[in-house]
Each structure stands twice: as structure tokens, then as C-alpha cells.
């Protein structure tokens, strides 16, 4: 089922990138939990359920005038899928630009995403799924 999990995560992120919230939710369990690397991270927020995901999307739109994630690779790691990506964003009002590596760990159960956890430091995500990388740029080659 590992490749199936990767495909679910890819399709969910494709829908999210199109800003098609309802399509993205089709790949998520109704009790999904999301911990973002940026939106709500400083407050320690965990967004729960489909309504929580909608809230996270709304906060993203409120916080940023531009918010783009470009996936670089997806990797199956057991019940999890690791997505390594790059984030480009610009703050609404402040104009502050973000240009950063990004990683997401998505946990799946019965073909649905039940948990998403974002990391601005891909090495932390790699360690979280049991892959230790000593070379800080090695995540790009994984």
C-alpha cells in the first residue's frame, strides 16, 4: 500500500495547491490533525478535523498574499509519507518574503490522511521518521 499512500498525499497536495479545499479534504480522515510549520506554529496550534483544515487554509490566506509550496519529492516511510518541498510566501501587509525548505510528514490510515505535521527544517522531519542525515543538504538528494 506504500505507493498508494504516496499517491494519496500527492493528490491531496495538488488539490491544496489549486486552493480546492473540498477536493483536498476528500483525501483526509474527518478527524485529521494538522500541525503547520508556519500558520499557528508560534501558538502551538493543532488544527483538528475538516473544519480545522478549513480554518488553517483561511488563516493562510489571511496571513499571506502569496503562499506556494513546490514539492520536490515524496517518500514512503511505513505508515507515513514524507514530502520534501520548498516554500515561497509573502506576508500580507508586511511584504515579508519567505523562501525556505519545507517538509511534511503525513500519516495515513485506511487510505486517508489522519495527521499532517510540517517542518521548516527538513532534517527534523527526516529524524522524525527515523532517517538521520548528517549532511544538511543531503535531504535534497534523499
Image: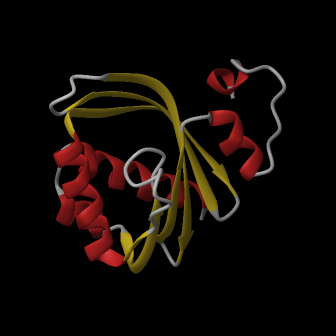
Quadrant of the rendering where the C terminus is positioned: top right
The quadrant in which residue 31 appears is bottom left
- Determine whether 28 is above or below 41 in the image: below
Number of marks:
0
Q: Residue at x 56, y 54 (%)?
A: 3
- Determine whether 39 is above or below 2 in the image: above
- Determine whether 129 is above or below 17 in the image: below
**Residue 29 position in % (x across, y down):** 40, 77
Q: Residue at x 31, y 71 (%)?
A: 52
The quadrant in which residue 26 appears is bottom left
In the drawing, does residue 125 fall left or right of residue 28? Answer: right
**Residue 120 position in % (x across, y down):** 54, 36
- Determine whether 117 is above or below 103 in the image: below
**Residue 124 position in % (x across, y down):** 70, 41
Which color scheme is applied?
secondary structure
Q: Nearer the viewer, residue 51 or 43?
A: 43
Looking at the image, the residue that sits furthest to the bottom is 31
Q: Residue at x 52, y 78 (%)?
A: 110
Q: Nearer the viewer, residue 130 or 94?
A: 94
In the drawing, does residue 7 fall left or right of residue 119? Answer: left
Q: Nearer the viewer, residue 38 or 28?
A: 38
In the drawing, does residue 5 fall left or right of residue 49? Answer: right
**Residue 94 position in % (x across, y down):** 21, 27
Quadrant of the rendering where the N terminus is positioned: bottom right
In the drawing, does residue 54 fall left or right of residue 78? Answer: left
Amino acid at each position: 500500500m506504500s505507493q498508494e499512500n504516496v499517491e494519496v498525499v500527492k493528490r491531496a497536495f495538488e488539490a491544496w495547491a489549486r486552493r480546492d479545499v473540498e477536493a483536498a479534504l476528500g483525501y483526509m480522515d474527518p478527524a485529521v490533525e494538522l500541525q503547520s510549520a508556519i500558520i499557528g506554529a508560534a501558538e502551538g496550534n493543532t488544527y483538528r478535523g475538516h473544519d480545522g483544515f478549513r480554518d488553517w487554509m483561511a488563516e493562510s490566506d489571511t496571513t499571506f498574499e502569496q503562499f506556494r509550496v513546490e514539492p520536490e519529492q515524496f517518500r514512503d516511510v511505513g505508515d507515513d509519507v514524507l514530502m520534501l518541498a520548498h516554500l515561497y510566501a509573502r506576508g500580507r501587509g508586511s511584504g515579508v518574503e519567505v523562501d525556505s525548505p519545507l517538509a511534511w510528514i503525513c500519516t495515513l490510515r485506511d487510505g486517508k490522511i489522519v495527521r499532517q505535521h510540517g517542518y521548516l527544517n527538513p532534517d527534523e522531519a527526516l529524524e522524525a521518521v527515523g532517517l538521520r542525515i548528517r549532511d544538511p543538504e543531503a535531504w535534497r538528494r534523499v
